[in-house]
C-alpha cells in the first residue's frame, strides 16, 4: 500500500515499529517517548515528501541504511538520506525491462501471477470465458 493511502495513525504506528526495530539493530535504547515522538516526525515526513513510495520501500531503505552506511545514529537527516537514496534506486530501475537492481526485486510483478490474473479478468469482462 502506498504511503498516501495509509491513514496517519496507522502510518505513525508502522513508523514506531520500524524505529524500534532499527534502534535495536543499531544497539541503541532510546526511551519509548523518544521513539513515539520521532515516529510522528517520520510519518509526517513520509506523508509530505515520500507519499508515492510503499511502506515496504521505507523499510528496505532503513534496512539498507543500517547495514550499508556508516551512519549509526538515526536522525532526520540520516533517515531522509536513506529514503532518498532508496527512492533513487527505485526510480532508476522503474522502466527497465532487464538488469533490474536485485535489491528492489520485491517490487517486481514477475512470478506473482498478476499478469495472468489481469488477463483472466479481461477475458471475463469481454465475455470470453
Image (cartoon, helix red, strand yellow):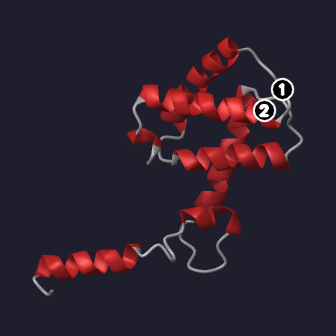
* Residue 100 appearing in the image: yes
* Tags 2 and 1 touching, CB below 8 Å: yes
- Provide residue 44's location: percent of width, then percent of height: 52, 26
Could you say which quadrant of the image residue 99 lies in?
bottom right
Question: Left or right of 10: which side holds 78?
Answer: right
Could you say which quadrant of the image residue 10 lies in?
top left
* Residue 84 appearing in the image: no
- Provide residue 86's location: percent of width, then percent of height: 67, 51
- Provide residue 105's location: percent of width, then percent of height: 62, 67
Q: In this view, does 52 lie above or below 37?
A: below
Question: Left or right of 94: which side holds 100?
Answer: right
Q: Which residue of the protein is positioned furthest toward the right in this rendering?
A: 70
> Alpha carbon of mark 2 to alpha carbon of mark 1: how far?
6 Å
Q: Which residue of the protein is positioned furthest toward the bottom in this rendering?
A: 128
**Label placed on residue 82:** none
Q: Is residue 69 above or below residue 104?
A: above
Residue in view at x 78 percent, y 32 percent: 24
Q: Which residue of the protein is positioned furthest toward the left in this rendering?
A: 127
Question: Is 89 in front, or is 128?
Answer: 128
Q: Mark 2 points at which residue?
A: 24
Residue in view at x 45 percent, y 47 percent: 2
Q: In which quadrant of the rendered image does the C terminus lie?
A: bottom left
Q: Is residue 14 above or below residue 33?
A: below
Residue in view at x 56 percent, y 79 percent: 97
Q: Name the residue under label 1.
A: 28
Instruction: Count neighbours of disc 2 (C-alpha within 10 A) and say few if under 14, some if 14 to 19, many if 20 or more.
Output: few
Residue in view at x 66 percent, y 58 percent: 89
- Tag 2 secondary structure: helix
- Provide residue 80's location: percent of width, then percent of height: 68, 36
Instruction: Count neighbours of disc 1 (C-alpha within 10 A) and say few if under 14, some if 14 to 19, many if 20 or more.
Output: some
- Tag 1 secondary structure: loop
Amino acid at each position: 500500500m502506498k504511503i498516501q493511502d495509509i491513514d496517519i495513525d496507522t502510518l505513525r504506528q508502522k513508523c514506531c515499529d520500524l524505529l524500534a526495530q532499527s534502534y535495536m539493530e543499531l544497539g541503541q535504547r532510546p526511551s519509548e517517548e523518544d521513539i513515539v515522538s520521532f515516529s510522528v516526525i517520520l510519518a509526517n515526513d513520509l506523508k509530505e515528501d515520500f507519499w508515492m513510495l510503499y511502506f515496504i520501500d521505507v523499510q528496505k531503505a532503513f534496512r539498507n541504511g543500517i547495514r550499508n552506511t556508516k551512519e549509526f545514529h538515526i536522525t532526520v537527516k540520516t533517515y531522509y538520506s536513506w529514503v532518498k537514496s532508496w527512492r533513487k534506486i527505485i526510480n532508476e530501475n522503474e522502466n527497465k525491462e532487464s538488469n533490474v537492481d536485485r535489491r528492489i526485486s520485491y517490487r517486481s510483478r514477475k512470478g506473482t501471477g498478476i499478469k495472468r490474473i489481469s488477463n483472466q479478468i479481461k477475458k471475463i469482462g469481454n465475455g470470453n470465458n
